[in-house]
Each structure stands twice: as C-alpha cells, then as structure tokens.
C-alpha cells in the first residue's frame, strides 16, 4: 500500500467494526448473541476488508468521486454479505471443498 498504509489499516479496522455490528444485530436474541458476533463477525470483517482493498486497488478506478463512492460501497457490501454467509452457513467449508476434491480424484 505504500504511503496509504495507515489508510488501509483504518479501512480494515472499520471493516471489522461494521462486520461485528452487523453480526451482532442479525444474531441478537439475548446477551449471548455477542458470541457469534465475535466468532464470525471479526474474521469475516478481516477477510472482507482485505478482499475489498485488493479489489479497490486493482479494479475500482474512476475519476468521478460520486461514482467511485457508489462502486466502493456496493462492492464492499456484496463482499461482506457473501463472506458472512459463507462463515455463518458454510460451516467448515474449506474442509468440505478439500474432501470433495479428494473423493472426486479417488473415483
């Protein structure tokens, strides 16, 4: 990131906070609703933030500030939703994918 290192860390921190709050709101049913927010919200925020920084640096260039803001907001929202669904409903999805390929190769 070069000169924008602190800005990148700020984006990552804000991503974690936004994801944590979103998970807390979705899974809030009592005080213990904070456990899934910590367990799933923080890692999904980190992953979404990192993917957003990569996507923003490589693909979201526009001269118009308003269009760039809309592109960034929509891209981050879609990334966060997809990653949160994978973390919430996917279970151990990396293990499932690796087992699928092991079984497919063994046939």
Image (cartoon, rainbow, N blue to C red):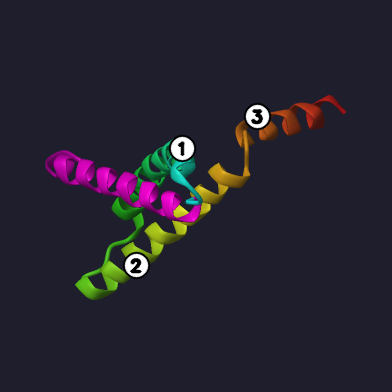
Q: Residue at x 17, y 40 (%)?
A: 5
- Judging by the rendered image, the residue that carries numbered circle 2 is 71
Q: Which of marks 2 and 1 is in front?
A: 1
SS category of the residue bearing label 1: helix
Is residue 23 visible in this depiction of the protein?
Answer: yes
- Circles 2 and 3, Cβ within 8 Å, touching? The answer is no
Q: Residue at x 41, y 54 (%)?
A: 22
Q: Residue at x 67, y 35 (%)?
A: 97
Q: How crowded is mark 3: few (under 14 residues within 10 Å), some or many (20 or more)?
A: few
Q: Nearer the viewer, mark 1 or mark 3?
A: 1
Image x and y of residue 8, in percent: 22, 44
Image x and y of residue 94, in percent: 61, 33
- Judging by the rendered image, the residue that carries numbered circle 3 is 95
- Count every numbered label the image shows and give the total: 3
Quick one: label 1 or label 3, which is nearer the N terminus? 1
Q: What stretch is highlighted in magenta?
A: 1-27
Marks 2/1: CA–CA distance: 32 Å
């Amino acid at each position: 990131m070069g000169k924008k290192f602190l800005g990148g860390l700020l984006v990552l921190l804000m991503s974690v906070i936004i994801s944590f709050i979103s998970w807390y709101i979705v899974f809030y049913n009592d005080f213990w609703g904070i456990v899934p927010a910590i367990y799933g919200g923080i890692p999904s925020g980190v992953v979404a933030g990192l993917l957003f920084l990569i996507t923003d640096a490589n693909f979201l260039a526009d001269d118009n500030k308003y269009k760039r803001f809309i592109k960034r907001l929509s891209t981050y929202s879609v990334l966060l939703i997809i990653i949160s669904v994978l973390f919430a409903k996917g279970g151990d999805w990396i293990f499932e994918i690796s087992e699928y390929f092991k079984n497919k190769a063994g046939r």
